[in-house]
Amino acid sequence: MLKKRIIPCLDIKNGRTVKGVNFIDIRDAGDPIELAKKYMQEGADELVFLDITATIEKRKTLAELVEKIAKEINIPFTVGGGINSIEDVSLIIKAGADKVSINSSAVKRPELISEIASQFGSQCVVVAIDTKFENNDWFVYVNGGKVPTLLKTIDWAIKAETLGAGEILLTSMNNDGTKNGFALDITRKICQAVNIPVIASGGAGKKEHFKDVFTQTIASGALAASIFHFGEIPIPELKNYLKTQNIPVR
Amino acid sequence: MIAIIKYNAGNTKSVENAIRRIGFNSIVTDDISTIVAAKKVIFPGVGEASSAMSYLKKYQLDEVIRSLKQPVLGICLGQQLMCKHSEEGNTDCLGIFNTKVRLFPPKEIVPQMGWNNLQGMKGDLFKGICDEDNVYFVHSYYAELSEETSAACDYILPFSAAMQKNNFYATQFHPEKSASVGEKILKNFLEL
């Protein structure tokens, strides 16, 4: 049986992980490789590295980091953040990433999805969607959730699939950071609207939230950052809990 | 020496990295004499079947792969290309395995992406691996079950997660991305 995926997300700035981390058993929590290895050993199913470095000259640094990660990590990983062109994608994939995640750049130029899919395969294109519920509907936001668009989230997800996306990473801005649980209704709707895997993101605060998203939607995976970084929910404990709830996990 | 076949499909880097992690050295090459002389050959692949087959034919790698006598391991698209025919681009493949490759039925989530467990494992590749162990899959096409199936997996329907015939081994999953279970399988292959 295909297992539900638990995916820690690491924010990277200038080659270092950001957000406070209080693991005592790793030497340097700001070192993305150390942190990634810890998650890998704990049973993370995949990793997402989100580069929040803004400047173009830092892109090369990112590719070098991806190369180091690829040498050490024996599970699949996705790299996202500021990927704007097929050249950016090529650099990251050749450095050893399994998938790239694109967000604002895909909204601005949807053909980027098809270009990546035809050159590297659909399986490596993750379309990340930041969504917010307002005026009675879910809309797409870009530029790190700062800029609203008129795109309805469901329409955009369907279009992304049609253009060749291999996966949707759906973050609800209403839920992100609240620790009140994933946005079940939009996650459910997107899962119903597309036939590609959907990863739920934003709002995880308790183990029960993972159970909810896996029992009340058909999401393929769930992504979280702070609860893993701060050691609030250790991955082995989360997986054991999900097993007791009859949710298939590795 | 371990040769990883270089062609137009795929990310050979992950395979190279995984082999290095388990303590072996490999070379990524499309040089026919190097491939033929290698102790083990790995035929990876992420991509599309018909363009990959045309490339292999253009550089006579199709004949080379078919005639190899040392242990050969096809991975993902590599396994599919070792079959007889693929529905992807209606492609005649290498025909090492007498099996057809089909598209998962529509209206289901495709690709299968993620960790799934193996069943009914046979052969040296799976020494020390048990039914509960999970490996990582990413694929929209699958090889049907056949006499050459050496491990099965169930997603929408049962299919060949691994195959073996004589010196030819293949996995639909990515051992290079399947944590310690995958490394064990790769090690088993390299120690054949």
Image (tube, coloured by chain):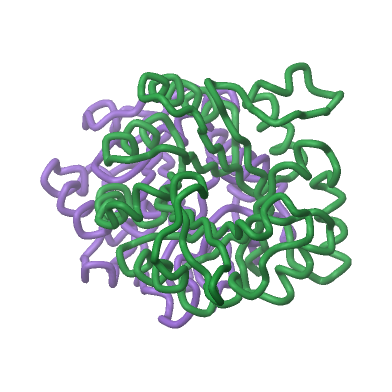
| Farthest front residue in view | A135
The chain shown in green is which? A
Which quarter of the rendered picture does the C terminus of chain A lie within? Answer: bottom right
Instruction: Give the image quarter of residue A136.
Output: bottom right
Question: Could you tell me which residue is drawn at 53 percent across and 34 percent down?
Answer: B190
Side (left or right) of A126 relative to B62 = right
Side (left or right) of A198 relative to A143 = right
Rendered view: A15 above or below A185: above
Q: Position of residue A138 (x, y in %)?
A: 52, 70
Asked if residue A175 can be seen in this view, the reply is yes
Query: Which residue is nearer to you in this view: A140 or B138?
Result: A140
Rendered view: A99 above or below B130: above
The chain shown in purple is which? B
Question: Could you tell me which residue is drawn at 53 percent across and 40 percent down?
Answer: B176
Instruction: Give the image quarter of residue B119.
Output: bottom right
Query: Which residue is nearer to you in this view: A178 or B54?
Result: A178
Asked if residue B158 can be seen in this view, the reply is no
Question: Could you tell me which residue is drawn at 47 percent across and 68 percent down?
Answer: A153
Query: Which residue is nearer to you in this view: A179 or A244?
Result: A179
Rendered view: A115 above or below B22: below
Q: Position of residue A41 (x, y in %)?
A: 74, 37
Q: Position of residue A44 (x, y in %)?
A: 70, 45
Rendered view: A170 above or below B75: below
Question: Could you tell me which residue is drawn at 65 percent across and 49 percent down?
Answer: A7
